[in-house]
Image (cartoon, rainbow, N blue to C red):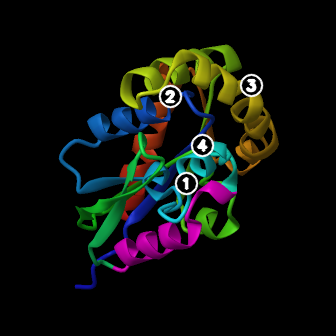
Amino acid sequence: MTKKQPIVIGVTGGSGSGKTTVTQAILDQLKGESILVLQQDYYYNNQDDMSMAERLAVNYDHPDAFDTELYLHDIKTLIAGSAIEAPVYDYKEFTRSAQTRHIETADIIILEGIMIFNDERLRNLMDIKVYVDTDDDIRFIRRLQRDVAERGRTVDSVIGQYLATAKPMYHQFIEPTKRYADLIVPEGGENQVAIDLLTLKARDILKGE
């Protein structure tokens, strides 16, 4: 019997929108299924050839900050049934780590990231496209808390980056991709109705319905 191709679910929204919470809710609902998450954040560009000053000047909220070609390659490899060695990004050094992350393929592949709807080639790989819609002020507070606690950033640097790039880039590149979504989820992972609908659809696809 021929093995079915994996289901690909894309989860996007602005930084701090609650994408990871939605993804975790999907994982919880589909517990017991063969499932993996491939975050776009793994695929920030390798910047070993740049000075720290140059790395700090990069706009990390722009589509060009990501190695989309490698992301596409790895997604297609997983869909084809093979494992990948995904890159690991060092947020304190602002470049790719020498380490990699071994990821085996699964029946359900969740793609999570701020720019995953931005490239038509990525969208075309997705069976279900989810946009997590959260107010700007909530997203900013979450981004501030995350970057200080997990990425070693100062409060001033996070505020400066948000005002200079994150907010304008969100309205230029991320919010317009809402039109590609099959499901728009307000309130993120707290929206149980949306999570239930999403996981029900995923189960239907798995069953071939």
C-beta proximity under 8 Å, tags 4 and 3: no
Q: Residue drawn 42% across and 54% down?
A: 42
Principal secondary structure, stretch drawn in magenta: helix
Q: Residue drawn 29% across and 69% down?
A: 85
Foreground: 175 or 53?
53
Q: Which mark is residue 56?
A: 4
Disc 4 to disc 2, C-alpha distance: 25 Å
Q: Earlier in the sequence, mark 3 or mark 2?
A: 2
Q: Is residue 209 visible?
A: no
Is disc 1 placed on a helix, strand or loop? loop
Q: Is residue 148 left or right of residue 117?
A: left
- The residue at which mark 2 appears reads as 18
Q: Earlier in the sequence, mark 1 or mark 3?
A: 1
Disc 4 to disc 3, C-alpha distance: 15 Å
Q: Give the residue type that dot 4 points to.
A: Leu
Judge the density around disc 1: few (<14), some (14-19), many (≥20) Cα neighbours within 10 Å. Answer: few
Q: Is residue 197 left or right of residue 182?
A: left
C-beta proximity under 8 Å, tags 1 and 3: no
Disc 3 to disc 2, C-alpha distance: 20 Å
Q: Which mark is residue 193?
A: none
Instruction: Read off the magenta span.
Output: 64-80
Q: Give the residue type that dot 3 points to.
A: Leu
Total tally of numbered discs in the picture? 4
Q: Give the residue type that dot 1 points to.
A: Ser
| Closer to viewer: mark 1 or mark 3 | 1
Q: Which mark is residue 51?
A: 1
